[in-house]
Image (cartoon, rainbow, N blue to C red):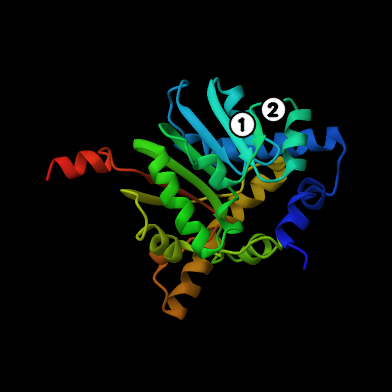
Amino acid sequence: MTDHRHHFYDQYTTVQTRTTDPAELRAIVHRTKVDLRHCVLPHVPTERTARIMDLGCGFGAFLSLLSDEGYQNAVGVDISPQQIAVAHQLGVTNARVASLRDALFGSSGFDCITMIDVIEHLTREEAIDTLNLISEVLRPGGTLILRTPNIDAAFGTVLSFGDLTHELHLNKLSTLELFATVNFHSVDIYPVPPVGGGILVRLLRSIVKPFVTLSERLAALVAGVQSNHRLTTPNMVIVAKTSVQSEAQRQSSR
């Protein structure tokens, strides 16, 4: 029987981007970096010497952005050999092929771990195990940053069900439920408004957004759903932090 993950991951760049042209891939990386600069980079530690691991780094867009910003100790892993091969072709050499578990076992002392469009590829059991492993790999007070599709958005199914390797479909409430069961001290969830586009697109967004927001609030009111229980953007960013005290320190202080 075909293993669907290997079937897709072995050719993931081609499957997702529909291209192998280096110029087109560089253009995709540029657009991705614009998005990540707005939604992920603000949550990364400001110290340029921070130890950062990008789990599921793909062809290295975020690693490239970190390099542009002067971060010196960032590494990335991805299970797809094709993704890593493309990353190397694009000049991102601090990325290697590895599974999430292999990358995390034996690691420690990271200031920040990122999972950009990754957790949705895991089953519930894998997500719980991975998050608990990450909490052990991060230093006390360390930061985990995830971006993932938000199934509550008006077009949330486009992203959440637009990839056949997605297993976990999250919204704000299910994210809070998941993190309440794992070893993190705090969790915050942020909407990811769209960026980019031409002047006309940005102008239309600014004009239409208040009407769309009002419509969504009225729809939630009619449906009896509390507005603070949901996000309306197709993606969301999750920022979780470990306790400033290690488990050993907490035990010794009791």
Q: Nearer the viewer, residue 148 or 13?
A: 13
Residue that carries the numbered disc 2 in the rendered image: 92
Write down the quadrant of residue 228 in the picture: bottom left
Q: Is residue 173 visible?
A: yes
Write down the quadrant of residue 143 in the picture: top left
Q: Residue 170 location in percent, x, y?
A: 52, 63
Q: Is residue 238 left or right of residue 209?
A: left
**Can you tell which mark lies on residue 89?**
none
For label 1, the SS is helix
- Answer few, some or many: residues within 10 Å of disc 1's Cα (few below 14, many 20 plus, some between 14 and 19): many
- Sequence-wise first label, 1 or 2: 1
Name above or below for residue 225 compared with residue 206: below
Residue that carries the numbered disc 1 in the rendered image: 63
Q: Is residue 95 left or right of residue 193?
A: right
Q: Is residue 111 left or right of residue 104?
A: left
For label 2, the SS is loop
Q: Residue 1 location in percent, x, y?
A: 77, 68
